[in-house]
Image (tube, rainbow, N blue to C red):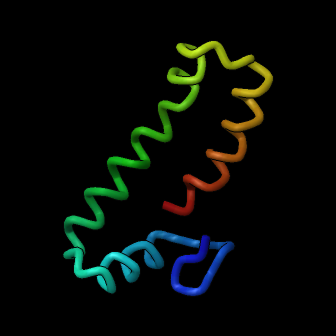
Amino acid sequence: MTINGKNTNINREDLLIAGKNMGIKANRCKEIINQVTDIVKQFPDYAKEVGIKEKTINSIQLILEKNIKLF
């Protein structure tokens, strides 16, 4: 998947530009980004609920934390 022609180092500004190109107002884009970010931060809780192994949760969480800083 690419956003604004990028498939790495995608940041909040890239998402806002993509939203604008799709006709979504900046404030609404920011709301959506914030909602998704908040939910992704809760990944460990969701993963535990469905029985994902702790080691797997930790591995995925490291990746999420690295990428969520971009937003």
User: 69 or 48, which is in the foreground?
Assistant: 48
Give the answer, above or below, for where 66 lies relative to 12.
above
| On screen, residue 1 above or below 5 | above
**What is the tally of numbered marks visible in this picture?**
0
Q: Position of residue 10 (x, y in %)?
A: 58, 72
Q: What residue lies at 68% left-to-right and 73% top-to-bottom?
A: 8
**Residue at the location (23% across, 75% down)?**
24
x, y percentage for residue 45? 52, 21
**17 sits left or right of 26 in the view:** right
Measured from the top left, where is residue 37 in percent x and y? 43, 48
Q: Please indicate whether residue 54 sits to the left or right of residue 40 in the image.
A: right
Task: Name the residue nearer the viewer: 65 or 16.
Answer: 16
Give the position of the N terminus as an image quadrant.
bottom right
- Residue sitting at x 44%, y 77%: 13
Image quadrant in which you'd find residue 62: top right
**54 horizontally vs 15: left or right:** right
